[in-house]
Image: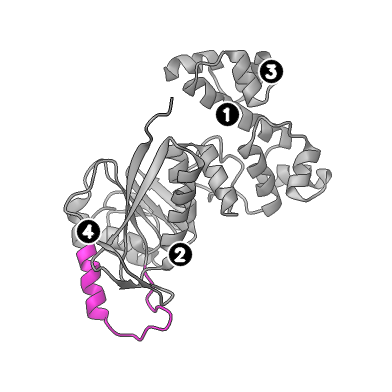
Amino acid sequence: MQTTPRRIPVYVVVPPRVLLLDVAGPIEVLRKANLEQEAVHFDVVYIGPARTLGSSVGMTISGIRPMPARLPDDTLVVVPGHADLPLGEPVTGDAQHAAHEQAIVDWLRRSIRPGIRVATICSGAILAARAGLLDGHACTTHHGCTDQLAREAPSAHVRENRLYVVDGERFTSAGITAGIDLMLHIVAGLAGAPVAVAVARFLVVYLRRAGDDPQLSPWLEGRNHMHPSIHRAQDAVAGDPAREWTVTALAREAAISPRRLSRLFNEHAGMSVTDYVNRMRVALASELLSGSQLDMEAVAERSGFGSARQLRRAWGRWNALPPSRSRDLAS
């Protein structure tokens, strides 16, 4: 029996001189997420202060809808950043750009209410700050804009050197490509971490995080590094935890020798290959326990464990309560 998907309205607010990658990257994450599963569907609409606006790369964006008088419940509002000097554009029109930006700020101030999530990409945080949306919240932005953000929102807690910051219904990311990282985090929270892993692999990016960034435990454990070979191995395991992952098999995925994989895995992920595989299997078992009525043997088999006893042994390394008790609390 096919269930009706949860539909998430996504309104992308297009500012003048919009940084095209701030829109294309995060929204491509949502497009692929829609194709990967049927439980959640992201309905994307582009809105702004004018039907046609220029972009950072000199391309004109048209078909932009007016900013609505009221947003639907459960909406995600995405506010991308802008370029100070777009490609091929003369330094003119500052007054019109300022008027368009103010129109966005006024609309944000009127429209954002409890239950509406706001995600800012790069310097889009500045517009949210001017609307008072970041007051009292932890937030971040492009490293070149942190001082300005602190001035625009003196009561905000501006975090530097962060890929993204989540504080309640406020999601803020650092410069440009960090918007992809933030949107992968949002997708993982709404559609599940395996979906985010699949999307990241399709986009040929890594599920990464900075030292104190929000972490989807345990799916992003051991991801606080930038080594591409180890990320390839971790993506392979996270995409199919139940597969029989030997060090040799993962070394082939990472395109390095088994001995080098073991050494680099401990060095960069902070755990052994075996520990990482078991951690991902326990994570999958946890989702099966909370989202299905499968008995413990079936959960163990689908998670890649040889028996329920083996699952319980691995489970106890990371959880205080036994798996059966975890299911009771989830129900």
Tell whether 257 sits left or right of 266. Answer: right
* Residue that label 1 marks: 284
Instruction: Write down the region rendered in magenta.
Output: 82-104
Q: Mark 2 — residue? A: 21
The residue identified by callout 4 is: 67
User: CA separation, marks 2 and 4?
Assistant: 21 Å
Q: CA distance from mark 1 to mark 2?
A: 33 Å
Asked if residue 40 is positioned above or below residue 84 in the image, the reply reads above
Gap in angstroms between the C-alphas marked 4 and 1: 41 Å
Residue found at x 37% / y 76%: 84
Residue lying furthest front in this view? 1
Q: Is residue 312 left or right of residue 190?
A: right
Q: Which mark is residue 312?
A: none
- Whether residue 161 is visible here, answered yes or no, is no
Check residue 310 in the rendering and tell me which mark sits there, or answer none: 3
Q: Position of residue 147 (x, y in %)?
A: 36, 66
- Asked if residue 256 is among those painted magenta in the image, a careful observer would answer no
Instruction: Please report the residue visible at 26 percent of the width from the left and 75 percent of the height from the top.
Output: 97
